[in-house]
Amino acid sequence: MADVGAYAAAFKVNFKNMLAYKTDIALDLTFTILSSLIFVFVWAAVYYFSGAGTLDGFSLNGIIAYFIVLAGISEVTGWPKIINNMEEDMKEGGIARFLIRPMNYTTQLLLESLPVDIVFFTFGSLPIIVGVVAFGHLSVTPSALALFAALMVIAYLMINIIGFIIGSMAVYLTSVWGVANAVTWLFSLAGGGVVPLFFLPDNIARLLMLTPFAFMYYIPDTTLLGIMPASAALQSVMIGTLWVIAFAIMASLLWRKVKRDINSVGG
């Protein structure tokens, strides 16, 4: 088994490689901001043509803050990059080579995707979130910040485990691109990425709050902005933890089957 030094060295190399692509980081940040502005303009038009200062108790400024914070969150939860790495390994037939290395394959995937996510969070998500709080003069409490951090960790783990499940399916599918796109769009649509859940009927919103969808966008967003009470956010942390465990078990069972199938055909 590979020692800790080997893992640390692999992480360091991948991190340095990611920092070399500064243009990619800048373009990704620009695209993220422009995407959020589209939703801001759409909702601004909704408020303008409705002639109301508030909708369901929420002002336009509140909606603007919601979607800009959403842009920062989506840098972490929008697309599980682990899918790309797994599909490439499966299609090129190099997966068997990775499986016989001393370093665990799932750990290798983590060491490849984590540096990318750290860079995009540091230079993408963090400036957006800090900017909203600072320029929007939002009063963010320490408890809300701690709950937001916990929810972001849960969302990150959840989306990457789901990405691992989808990536594992590359053994059986010609391409997992369509599946991945469908899943990420579903998360966005049902998780408050297009329409905030507080605009939906109460029974539908409460149901979606119990599903993994809301953990990608709505729950961490409204927790940071103080829209969701701390007690509800804490409950969401517990529910989200259960979802992470459930998806981890599902991923583990699927990966066992995938490895058996890979070994049976020689990679």
Image (spheres, grey):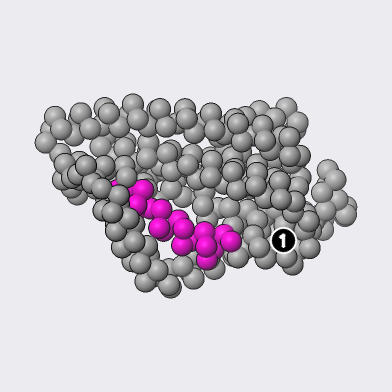
Position of residue 87 measured from the top left corner of the image (x, y, whole percent): 29, 46
- Asked if residue 203 is positioned above or below residue 175 in the image, the reply reads above
Main SS class of the magenta portion in the image: helix
Residue positioned 20% across, 30% down in the render? 261
Q: Which residue is more in the foreground, 89 or 134?
A: 134
Position of residue 209 measured from the top left corner of the image (x, y, whole percent): 65, 33
Residue positioned 64% across, 34% down in the render? 236
Position of residue 111 measured from the top left corner of the image (x, y, whole percent): 34, 52
For label 1, the residue is: 133
Q: Which image quadrant: the N terminus? A: top left
Magenta region, residue range = 108-126
Q: Residues within 10 Å of mark 1 (few under 14, many from 20)?
A: some
Residue positioned 57% across, 59% down in the render? 125
- Residue 122 colored magenta? yes
Residue positioned 78% across, 56% down in the render? 139
| Residue that protrudes farthest toward the right in the picture | 52
Q: Which residue is more in the foreground, 142 or 157?
A: 142
- Residue 135 colored magenta? no
Q: Amino acid at mark 1?
A: Val
